[in-house]
Amino acid sequence: MQRIAVVPGSFDPVTLGHLDVIERAAGLFDELHVLVVHNPDKSALLPIASRVSLLERAISEGGLPANIVVASWNVGLLVDYCTDVGASVLVKGIRSQIDVAYETPMAIVNRDLASVETIFLLPNPAHAHVSSSLVRQVAALGGNVAPYVPDAVSEFLQGERR
Ligand code: PNS
């Protein structure tokens, strides 16, 4: 039986921290879906289509494993997508106690809804301070985001500024 997992997130934009979690999760499963999900609690920087194409570029330019699929989802519960693709596990990166507090209720609800388990990966310490919201703020104020994001994102955001 294929072991299929999903890494969901806003990815607005994808960061080096996300890529690290995605690469390590891809090594644990036969197939890994990286799923861009609209989060109504956050004000978006990039449209979903741009987030998907930046993820695809970052994954291929970063030489990540070929068992990764990038998709987006905006029509229902995250666990409905899991059921559709036969995934029984969600993978999330956890950087701090704040992340644990944010993720724990969602993990319990997703297990209640569809018996989908959540596993948490600890970050590479080099990226433990990096978040999309920090990148959005630095980019909005004209700072250099290159240390925190894949080249594809850095180039895209520079292009937006011109
Ligand atoms: O990168 P983010 O913004 O922290 O990702 C949060 C996300 C998109 C994974 C979360 O908001 C989510 O799971 N949304 C899907 C909606 C859903 O299924 N909700 C009910 C169970 S928690």
Image (tube, rainbow, N blue to C red):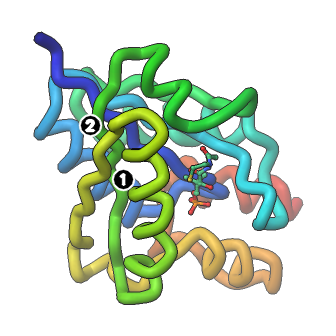
Residue at the top extreme of this rendering: 1
User: How far apart are the two marked residues, 1 and 2, measured between alpha carbons?
Assistant: 9 Å
Query: Dot 2, crowdedness within 10 Å: few (<14), some or many (≥20)?
Result: some
Residue 122 at what x, y percent from top left? 22, 71
Q: Which residue is mark 1?
A: 19
Residue at horizontal 62 percent and vertical 57 percent from the top:
13
Q: Are marks 1 and 2 in contact (CB under 8 Å)?
A: yes
Residue at horizontal 42 percent and vertical 45 percent from the top:
112
Residue at horizontal 78 percent and vertical 82 percent from the top:
142
Residue 114 at what x, y percent from top left? 42, 33
What mark, if any, has residue 157 been given in the picture? none
Dot 1 or dot 2: first in sequence order is 1
Q: Amino acid at mark 1?
A: Leu
Residue 54 at what x, y percent from top left? 59, 41
What is the quadrant of residue 31 in the picture? top left
Instruction: Left or right? Give the position of 91 relative to 129.
Output: left
Query: Dot 1, crowdedness within 10 Å: few (<14), some or many (≥20)?
Result: some
Q: Secondary structure at mark 2?
A: loop
Q: Which residue is mark 2?
A: 64
Residue 25 drawn above or below residue 144: above
Instruction: Left or right? Give the position of 100 relative to 72.
Output: left
Residue at horizontal 35 percent and vertical 79 percent from the top:
95
Query: Could you say which is closer to the camera, residue 149 or residue 109?
Result: 109
What is the quadrant of residue 157 in the picture? bottom right
Query: Disc 2, ligand 1: is the CB inside 8 Å?
Result: no
Instruction: Left or right? Give the position of 81 relative to 60.
Output: right
Give the position of the N terminus as an image quadrant.
top left
Q: Amino acid at mark 2?
A: Leu
